[in-house]
Amino acid sequence: MSEKQHMIEESKRFILKNIHNVEVIKSAADQFKMSYDSFRKAFAWQTGESPGQYYNRLKIDLAKTLLSTTNWKIVVIAKECGFQSERTFIRAFKKIVGKTPGQFRIDHD
């Protein structure tokens, strides 16, 4: 594994561990003493997605788990997953999953 590949794997673990921190991507770049732009380019080159896309996908994965395992309201899940509003959450969820959170919950009950 190259040094860059190792750095990206470490940064993915860091992002997952700090998923509730809205500044996590900047913090990951800082951790490796890289500018955000350099970090973003290296991350995208290694993974095929930007750090922001990766971060959003992780948040949506957490939301899918919560939708499947809890009876929490969608607005509560949105906040728990770090979204600023229910509307933003629903839009991001539908873009990634292809269904609204409500539709996903019905399909997985």
Image (cartoon, rainbow, N blue to C red):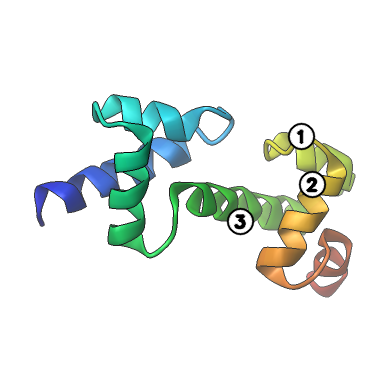
Q: Is residue 107 above or below residue 22?
A: below
Q: Nearer the viewer, mark 2 or mark 3?
A: 2
The answer to whether residue 10 is left or right of residue 89 is: left
Query: Which class describes the residues within 10 Å of circle 1: few (<14), some (14-19), or many (20+)?
Result: few
Q: CA distance from mark 2 to mark 3?
A: 16 Å
Element on which disc 3 rests: helix
Residue under label 3, please give it: 61
Residue under label 2, please give it: 88
Q: Residue furthest front?
A: 37
The answer to whether residue 62 is left or right of residue 5 is: right
Amino acid type, mark 3 = Asp
- The image position of residue 40, as x and y in percent, is 37, 46
Q: Nearer the viewer, mark 1 or mark 3?
A: 1
Element on which disc 1 rests: loop
Residue under label 1, please give it: 84
Q: CA distance from mark 1 to mark 3?
A: 17 Å
